[in-house]
Image (cartoon, helix red, strand yellow):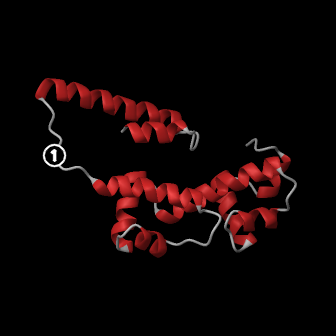
Amino acid sequence: LMNRIIYEAEGIDELSGHMQKTYFQELMLFIIRCFKNGPQMGEIDVANDIIQKAAKYIYENSDKNIGLNEVAEKFGMSSSYFSKKFKAVTGFGFKEYLIGVRIKEASNLLLTTDKSITEIAISCGFNDSNYFGDAFRRIKGMSPNKYRKNKGAI
């Protein structure tokens, strides 16, 4: 829980503050339960730690051509188990998370650089600028060009 609180402190998205508070509340409830009932650790879920590491790996390598099979193999899991576990731990599907990370970086580049939209798409890991445009519209509600012109305002 502390790792999750620290992770959310990095401001991953607009919900990070809420997630941080929720994890903190969960931590407090856990501590209260331990004082009341004594520690009952049970099984430690090692897969959660692996998924956190995998999410960090995806975040750090989102500009590369990475896929579910590659990441699952890197972390010693079958792709189907990894996919289910990743969704359960992060709340996002693998592809949804990867595209979200890429769009976040692209949004930043649109506002802070003069690179062309195609250059930004490629530098953020999108091989096809049309797909980038569609994904960007779906997440941000406007085209990359309009996002840049409006300085990110929706």
Quarter-wise, where is residue 22 in the image?
Answer: top left
Looking at the image, the residue that sits furthest to the right is 114
- Tell me which residue sits at (32%, 32%) in the image: 27
- Tell me which residue sits at (88%, 54%) in the image: 114
Quarter in which the N terminus is drawn:
top left
Horizontal arrangement in the rendering, residue 70 relative to residue 63 (left or right)? left
- Tell me which residue sits at (33%, 68%) in the image: 81
Quarter in which the C terminus is drawn:
top right
The percent position of residue 61, horizontal first and vertical second, equals 59, 62
- Tell me which residue sits at (43%, 30%) in the image: 21
Horizontal arrangement in the rendering, residue 90 relative to residue 34 (left or right)? right
Q: Disc 1 on helix, strand or loop? A: loop
**109, 130: nearer the viewer:** 109
The percent position of residue 63, horizontal first and vertical second, equals 65, 64
The percent position of residue 86, horizontal first and vertical second, equals 40, 59
Q: Is residue 98 above or below residue 148?
A: below
Horizontal arrangement in the rendering, residue 29 relative to residue 65 (left or right)? left
- Residue that mark 1 sits on: 42
Mark 1 is surrounded, within 10 Å at the Cα level, by few (under 14), some (14 to 19) or many (20 or more) other residues, namely few
Q: Is residue 39 above or below residue 7?
A: above
Q: Is residue 111 above or below residue 129?
A: above
Instruction: Please give the count of numbered marks on the rendered protein.
Output: 1
Quarter-wise, where is residue 29 in the image?
Answer: top left
The percent position of residue 23, horizontal first and vertical second, equals 38, 35
Q: Which amino acid is tagged 1?
A: Gly
Horizontal arrangement in the rendering, residue 40 relative to residue 48 (left or right)? left
**84, 27: nearer the viewer:** 27
